[in-house]
Amino acid sequence: MRTRVKICGVTRPEDAAAAVELGADAIGLVFCDASPRAVDMKEARAIVAAVPAFVSVVGLFVDPKPGQVEVAVEGLHLDTLQFHGNEAPELCRHYERRYVKAVPMGGGADPSEYVAAYPDASGFLFDSHRVGERGGRGESFDHDTIPGGVRGLTVAGGLSAENVAEVVRKVRPFAVDVSSGVESEPGIKDRERIARFLAEVERGDET
């Protein structure tokens, strides 16, 4: 099975267009003010307009404020929601959209118990952050600690063209999620780095 690729933290329409042209399966928009990759609704609309049909647009939230998710869902027609905070299962399912829950692998939480607490999630993203942190730090973690049999298993955290092929070979995830690993600076994606990353994912699939 081919590993899907999500390019997260996109802040410019031209970066979204380049990622799609090069073969990305999904584009991630960050709605968290503390992130250098955060976008407002005007910026998000311009990015979404650059994404054609059959490429997913994912909205990333961290303990969203009341009404924040609804505004983004209605205004952008997001395909999938991604929650990176301490959101309860009831909140995640409240929006009646497919959602991915980030699993903190930085210590403190049992990943199997964490996954079991969200039975209706469409997927789980394993990242290096600790419980209560927002993730997106560009740090890796011990992939041997990922439990088996996880639906929609997505690996994030410290991925780049230098290591993603090995991660794909070792974990065989459904998808990988990259942000800082394909940037020239925070929030600015680099076309050449995206191309190299995608090529390395494909190489990992083939070996």
Image (cartoon, grey):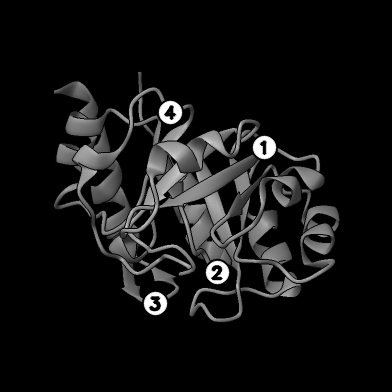
* Camera sees residue 74: yes
For the residues marked 2 and 4, what is the alpha-carbon distance in whole angstroms? 32 Å
**Marks 4/1: CA–CA distance:** 27 Å
Image check: 136 left or right of 11?
left
**In this orientation, does residue 176 appear?**
no
Rendering coords of residue 78 (x, y %) = 72, 48
State the image coordinates of residue 199 (x, y, percent, origin top left).
24, 40
Q: Nearer the viewer, residue 161 or 102?
A: 102
Q: Are marks 1 and 2 in contact (CB under 8 Å)?
A: no
Residue type (three-letter) at the residue carrying disc 1? Ala
Extreme residue toward the top, this view? 1
- Looking at marks 1 and 2 on the same chain, the residue that comes earlier in the sequence is marked by 2
Quadrant of the frame with the C terminus: top left
Q: Which mark sits nearer the N-terminus, 3 or 4?
A: 4
Residue denoted by label 2: 12
Q: Earlier in the sequence, mark 4 or mark 1?
A: 1
The mark nearer the N terminus, 3 or 2, is 2
At x 29% / y 61%, what residue is drawn? 181
The quarter of the rendered structure image containing the N terminus is top left
* Residue at 59%, 51% in the rendered image: 82
Instruction: Give the SS element for disc 4.
Output: loop
**Camera-side residue: 128 or 68?**
128
Residue named by callout 1: 53
Amino acid carrying mark 2 in the image? Arg
Q: Are marks 2 and 4 in contact (CB under 8 Å)?
A: no
